[in-house]
Image (tube, grey):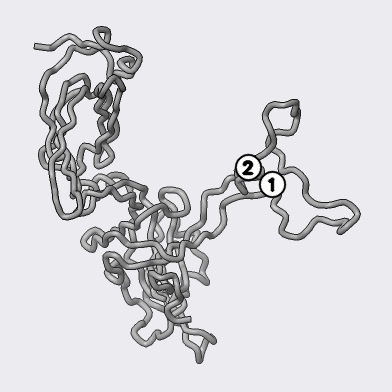
Amino acid sequence: MNGIIDVVEKAYLKQNPPKFNVGDQVKVHMRIVEGTKERIQVIEGIVIRKRGTGTRETFTVRKMSHGTGIERIFPLHSPRVEKVEVIRKHKIRRAKLYYLRDLRGKAARLTEKH
Amino acid sequence: MIGLLGRKVGMTQVFDESGNCIPVTVLAMGECRTVQVKTKEKDGYDAIQLGFDDVTKKDKKKVTKARMGHFKKADLKPMKQLREFRMDDVSDFNPGKKITVEIFEDGEKVQVSATSKGRGFAGVFKRYNFGGQSATRGSHEVFRHGGSIGNHTEPARVVKGRKMPGHMGNKRISQISQKVYKVMKDKNLLLVVGGVPGPNGGVVEVAKSRRHSSGKKQNA
């Protein structure tokens, strides 16, 4: 029985899944279909979590929008996630950056990784 | 309706053409063999009996002589699971005939039956989704109780069918119209939309649904 799920999922995985890490400032290009029209929406923010494996792998992008924190969860292998651009990499010491939720403004900055 | 036996592998999710995420259960269907064909003249009803899962060498001595003879009649090796499927017409079937996942098509409605996971002696919260009593406002010792079970002198008894605590699960559950998302013929796998009763590794029966997608019976 082991491995059968992997075999099933293989057909639905992206050939070259976007490469980025937790803590990266990213631009996520989403394909959005409105009626018959299709457009690309870009969401920019910091990746605060990656979880799951196979087709169930997801990542969460956090951004500040008009003073309110917005978090959006994307399935990594979803065809609607067109591409993920890495803008800036940051030095982080956690796998999950939930602590950013409690911080505002200057305190919520991360140091850049070169 | 013709059906097939298999085992539940587990759940995952896949993406359709428009990018929707669909929860599916993966079923590893067996290459089932017709062990016996029952006919109206001989047995009073038309049905086929399917065998699934060959008995391993280790379990060979567990097969009774009577059962061994039953398989021998169809010229087959003994199998662990035997199930009957009622049919309208059995003329296409003969003992020993192989039935695989090819009988199903993508997008078809099927009936999935299996034994649900046993929950033991369960209270009314878990068993019937009761709400229980207030946690505060002075209540004590009664939080998860079912409440009143009836009246006093009239009718002076508890009405039959009253929902009360008791054994939950470990019984046969049939889901009458589940959609087949995909048939993977080369690997004998079936992807069914949504959940399926029972634990991973449990035996499931998948039969062609007797219902249209509208919910009406196809041939009553």
**Along the line of sight, which residue is nearer the eye, B208 or B160?**
B160
Secondary structure found at label 1: loop
Q: Chain of mark 2?
A: B
Q: Position of residue A83 (x, y in %)?
A: 12, 36
Q: Quadrant of the N terminus of chain B?
A: bottom left
Chain letter for mark 1:
B
State the residue position of label 2.
Answer: B125
Comparing labels 2 and 1, the label whose residue is closer to the camera: 2
Q: Residues within 10 Å of mark 2 (few under 14, many from 20)?
A: some
Q: Measured along the vertical axis of the image, is residue B52 above or below residue B143?
A: below
Q: Which residue is mark 1?
A: B165
| Residue type marked 2 | Phe
The part of the image, by quadrant, that contains residue B154 is bottom right
Q: Residue at x 22, y 24 (%)?
A: A47
Q: Looking at the image, how many numbered discs can be counted on the residues?
A: 2
Q: Earlier in the sequence, mark 2 or mark 1?
A: 2
Relative image position of residue B80 (x, y in whole percent): 44, 62
Compared with residue A109, is residue B136 higher up or lower down, i.e. above or below? below
In this picture, is B143 found above or below B2? above
State the residue at coordinates (35%, 56%): B193
